Amino acid sequence: MTLISMFEQSVEQHGNKPALAHKPKGGTYQDISYTQFGESVDTFSKGLAILGVQKGDRVAILSENRPEWAISDFGILKVGAINVPMFSTLTAAQVGYILNDSESKIICVSTEKQLEKVATIHEEVPSLEQIIIYDQLEGEAPEGVYEFADVCSQGMETDVTLDDVTEENEIATIIYTSGTTGNPKGVMLTHANFLSNYTAAKSLVDVSDTDVLLSFLPLSHVFERLGGHYVPIFSGAKIAYAESTFTVAQNMQEVSPTVMLSVPRLYETMHDRVLRAVEAGSSLKQKIFHWGVSVGSKVSSEIQQGNKPSAILNFKQSIADKLVFAKLKTATGGQLRFFISGGAALPQSIAEFFHAAGILILEGYGLTETSPVISLNYPEKWKFGTVGAPVPGIEIQIAEDGEILTRGPHVMKGYFNNETATAEVIDADGWFHTGDIGIIDEDGFIKITDRKKNIIVLSNGKNVAPQPIESQLVQSPYIDQIMLVGNERKNIAALIVPNFDALKSWASENDVDNSDMPELLKTRDVQQLIQKEIRDRLTDFADFEQVRRFALLEKEFSQEEDEMTPTLKLKRNVIKEKYGNVIEGMYPDES
């Protein structure tokens, strides 16, 4: 089996059922059936063949999530070519690097804005022959640029027949890693990589033709590519594309998803909004809320221990659902079976809060190089604070230094045109070295403690894993983002982006002038507030893990400033360099 044969099998099986849904500007969601989906893939693949695309050629995609992305993916695969997806937020220079490194022949872009990016670097990419744009152009198409609809029309008119000669061990895609340090590397994933991972994930998490997924994580990221694209399509489910990352809350209510994938940031934002709404309410509403959470937490605890909640507890929970949690469930569309979290560490307290509210978040773990799932919590077996147990069909072991190693059919073929880098992560016995530090507990669940390269080594030789500390501190309502520093220093310090709205509210309640945020951050009152939050939340950490100093930053970390990857991971080296003077200022006695 290959990805394209699985797709065609699903099209035949599900016919007129809705496969994809999108929302035109100013309109409502419109469905595309599996039959229509299959016909579009067929005509687009033939159109690519007319443009000269042959087996093994690389075809890039630079686009936000939309039906054309899905059609392009399977169209590229059907002609035997290789999909090279790119985040729509990449700069022109980054796009140029990937196009050159992958030697892409064609690129599909979503809008004229993305077309302009490619136009600025087109002459620097000798392999690039044509550009396909999804949107309709306002004027005449420049030379070498084709509208998506025209490519499909040409494919519809041709009598070309495409024979599926692709084999399962051939490359399906080259996905470039986000590149928190240095240039990104092209991860070669085969049809067999994806299908082995699909089979493993599907055996644990039941997704069927009755499910609806809201897709908003970038399809260029392997997490969404498998879980929000291949899994639902091969299962006959419906995928609705969010209009943007800013409309997810509205779109959830419009499409009522039953399953949804996200990075932890969404859940943290939802949690913060709930707490802010409670704090703005009356003392009676606050008491009712905290009572409801207490009841939900007791029910959650019983379930986690394998017990059946008592009749009295179930009765209290039914009241809590109506008085406290009904609005939260309505905000998700009211039909949600579970969330799936990946891409970064999910704070345990967030998972516990949602479960107390009757919403289960299943956390998993993997990397681009493992296509991607290594471990997963699933409805019948889960433990908060872990990333689940290894999925079927793969091997896991913990190296002497604590690094997680994995071996099996999910491991990539290698890095494109980079045998040296491949040899650095896949050893002679076939073990892939993840770069993550973790443990396997007595119940077989994996717990990630940090990235190996992120470990901070203090001047006294103590090793500090920043992730658990950072995860604990961002639970403060006054801390939005944080990055620990302190390598080769005497102690740990932190760059902190405060929650500006929460600080303004706090200042108003405490008669502190909040008209000038930069000045507010410097006040003794705010400094003491943050210091207390740090001290109170790190009581369970060792003395050498305590954050002794911190600096409050006036601007949040962002992709636009190249401080975060498209999957919202901090680019620590970039941030360290940018705030070098601030960091030095926290260590005046060590300069």
Image (tube, rainbow, N blue to C red):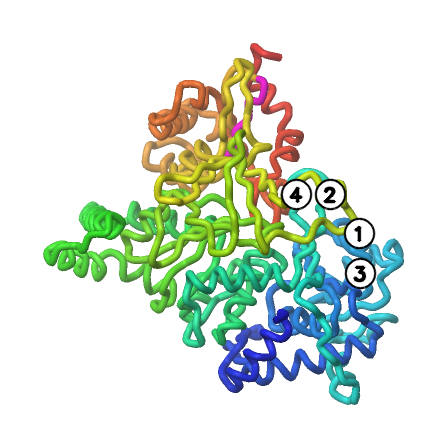
Where residue 85 sits, quadrant-wise, is: bottom right
Question: Which mark, by number, is residue 104?
Answer: 3
**Mark 1 Cα-neighbour bin, 10 Å: few <14, some 14–19, many ≥20:** some
Q: CA distance from mark 4 to mark 1?
A: 21 Å
Nearer to the camera, 464 or 286:
464
Q: CA distance from mark 3 to mark 2?
A: 17 Å
- Classify residue 438 as left or right of residue 152: left
Query: Which quadrant is the N terminus positioned in?
Result: bottom right
Q: Residue at x 53, y 77 (%)?
A: 19
Q: CA distance from mark 4 to mark 2?
A: 19 Å
In the image, residue 572 sits, relative to residue 32, either above or below, namely above
Q: CA distance from mark 1 to mark 2?
A: 10 Å
Which tag is nearer the camera, tag 4 or tag 2? 4
| Residue at far front of view | 429
Nearer to the camera, 89 or 127:
127
> Is the C-beta separation of discs 1 and 2 under 8 Å?
yes
**Residue type indicated by callout 2:** Asn
Q: Secondary structure at mark 2?
A: loop
| Residue at far top of view | 589
**Mark 4 Cα-neighbour bin, 10 Å: few <14, some 14–19, many ≥20:** many
Q: Residue at x 69, y 68 (%)?
A: 167
Q: Secondary structure at mark 3?
A: loop
Which numbered disc flags the more N-terminal residue, 3 or 4? 3
Q: Which residues are magenta?
A: 482-488
Q: Which residue is mark 4?
A: 426
Which numbered disc flags the more N-terminal residue, 4 or 2? 2
Which numbered disc flags the more N-terminal residue, 4 or 1? 1
Q: CA distance from mark 1 to mark 3?
A: 8 Å
